[in-house]
Amino acid sequence: MRKILGTKGRKRGYVKIILVFTIAFVLGYILRSSPPHPPGEHGNTMVGETEAKARMWTCSMHPQIKLPNPGQCPICFMDLVPFEGDEGDTDHPRQLTMSETAKALAEIQTAPVVRERVMSAVQMVGKVEYDETRLANITAWVPGRIDSLYVDYTGISVEVGDPMVSIYSPDLVSTQKELLQAIDGEKKVSGSTIEEIQKMATSLRLAAEERLRLWGLSTEQIDEIKGRGKVVDHTTIRAPVGGVVIEKQGFEGMYVQTGTPLYTIADLSQVWVSLDAYESDMMWLHSGQDVEFTAEAYPGETFLGQVAFIDPFLNEKTRTVRLRVNVPNPDGRLKPGMFVRSRIRANINDGGQAVAQEKPGGTVDPLVIPASAPLITGKRAIVYVEVQGTDRPTYEGRVVELGPRTDDTYIVKSGLQEGEMVVVRGNFKIDSALQIKAKPSMMNPEGGGPPPIHSHGTHTSEKPEASRQTPGADEFRNSLSSVLSTYLETQKALASDDLAKAKGSLKHIGHALEAAKMGVLEDEAHVKWMKLSRRIESASEEAFGTDDIDVARRAFATLSHAILEVIRTFGRPDSIVLYEIYCSMAFDGEGASWVQDSKEIANPYYGAMMLRCGEVKGEF
C-alpha cells in the first residue's frame, strides 16, 4: 500500500512541474510579443495593422468563393487570390469598382460606342427561272393543216426569222387569189378616166395584202406572190425572236385554228433568279440592291444580279416573300431550274432600315456597339459602361434599347452616347460580382436579396412567351424531345472527350429537326423556329465535319446558344428538366453556356481537364 501511494505521489509531482513550465512559457511569450512602446511611436503602425487585419481569399473566376486561407478554388481549381474587400466600392446601385489587379485578372476589355455605316448580310436560297418578258409564243395565224415541222423537238436554239412550220390553209389560198384578181383589176382600170373606179381597185388590192400580212406572211412573201403571179398553197411561220424552244405543241398533220399554240421560245441571254426571303429579313431588302450568288453547277464562281421586283404578297405557309433578280446570261451558262445560294449586303441607316448602296449620303450613320457587349435576357439588354474620371476602374450597368443585329454589331436606339466605352469582354464577370453584392444585374434587375449560391441556380416557373401566346406551342414544345436528346448526348460525349461519339449523335440532328411539329406554329413563332433550326443545323454540320475536338467545341457553343434560345422561346418538353450552366473560363475567358439534364456539372468545353468548372445559372 505504501508503495502504491508513493508512486501516485510521484505522478502528482510530475504533473505540477509540467504545469508550472507551461504557464511560464505562455507568460514569457506574451511579454516578449507585447510592444515596449505604444503603436506608432517607433513606426510600427503598418506592421501591426497588417498582422491584425483578417484576410480572405477568393477566385478571380468565381468571386462568390471566399475562404479564410489560400489554396485552390473548389470549382475550377485555380489558385485563390487575396480578396481586397469593398473599400473602394461605390454607393451607386448599378456601379462596381475594382482594383487594377482585379481588372487584369478578370481580363476586362472595352470598346467605344461609334457611329458608322454598317452592313447586314441576308442569306437566301432560290433557283434560276426564265425571264418572262423574253418569252415568245408562236401560234397559228390562219386555220389549216400542218404539213411540215422544221423544229420538231424542244431545247433547240433558233434565230430570228428561222422557219418553224409550214401550213396548208384554204383560207390563205382564197385570199391570194383575191390579191391576184385585185392586181389584174387595178391594171385594167388604170387607164380609166373615172377616178373612183381606180381608187376602188386599189383598195381591194390593199385589203387583200393586209389580210395576208395579218395571217403571218411577211412583206417579202407578199411581194413574191405578186411577182410570181401564182397562188402559194402553203405558208411558212418563222421565229419572231431568237432563243431556245422550251415547248412544242404542234405536230405534222395536225389541224389548227387561228390562235392554236405551236411553240414557246425563251431568250436566255438574261434570266431571273427567284429568291425566298423570310419576313423578318424584309427590313434589309429593297429594289435595286446588288445580289451575289453561287450555283451548284459552278462551285467557287460568283454571279451578279440586281433586285428588280419584290412580291407584294407573303406566302402564308412558308412565311416568305419572293424576290426577283435580273441576271445577265450572255453565254447561257445559267440554266432555268438551277439551285442557287445568294447573299445581299444591305447598308443600314440610323433608323435601322436598309438604304441604297449607291446613295450613302443624306442619312445619319447609326450608333453601334460590338455584338459581345450587351447581355440579353428576354427583351432586356444590359451594357456595362466604363465610368470616366474615377480613381479606380468603375463600371456602370445600363439598360439599353437595341436595334437589329448585323454581322458582328448591334445598332443602339437609346441608352448610350457616342464615345462612351462599353465592356466587350468580362461583362459576365462584372454582372456576377453585382449579383454577389445584391445589386441590380442582368439576372436580378431590382437587386436586393441574398447573393446567389453556386450550383443552385434559379428556377423558372413561368412559361416562355411563345407558350403563353401562340396556339399549338405546347404541342410543338413536346415535339422537341428528339432535338434536345441529340443535343444532350453530344454534350455528354464532349464532356467525356469523345469526339467520335459526339459526331455520331450529331448525324441524327436532321431527323430530329424534321420531327419537330413546326406546322402548328403561326406567325412570329413560325419564323423564329425557322431561323433557330437553321442555326442548329449549321452549327451541327460544322461540328460533325471536323476531326479537331477544339473546333467541334467551338461549334457546340454556337449550337448551345441556339438551343438556349429555343428553350427560352418555346420551353422544354414536359418529360425532362434542364439546367443552364455557364463557364466563364471557356475559350480563353470569353465564357460560354450550355444545357444539361443534371445539376452535376460536366463541362463540354474542357472535358476531363476541368470537368466541374461552371455554375448553374438557371433551371428550366
Image (spheres, rainbow, N blue to C red):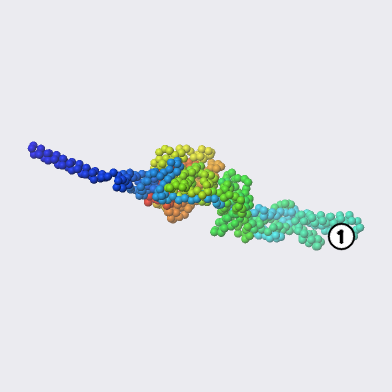
* Front in this rendered view, residue 370 or 285: 370
Q: Residues within 10 Å of mark 1 (few under 14, many from 20)?
A: some
* Front in this rendered view, residue 318 or 277: 277
Among the 4 quarters of the image, the one containing residue 546: bottom left
At x 64%, y 54%, the residue is 131
Q: Quadrant of the C terminus?
A: top left
x, y (%) of residue 517?
Answer: 51, 43
Q: Secondary structure at mark 1?
A: helix
* Front in this rendered view, residue 95 or 220: 95
At x 91%, y 56%, the residue is 194
At x 39%, y 44%, the residue is 87
Q: Which residue is labeled 1 in the image?
A: 187
x, y (%) of residue 108?
Answer: 44, 50
At x 79%, y 55%, the residue is 210
Query: Can see residue 66?
Result: yes
- Left or right: where 224 falls relative to 425: right
- Left or right: where 72 falls relative to 327: left
> In the current view of this chain or complex, which residue is farthest to the front?
41
Q: Quadrant of the N terminus?
A: top left
x, y (%) of residue 543?
Answer: 46, 52
* Front in this rendered view, residue 147 or 382: 382
- Amino acid type of disc 1? Lys
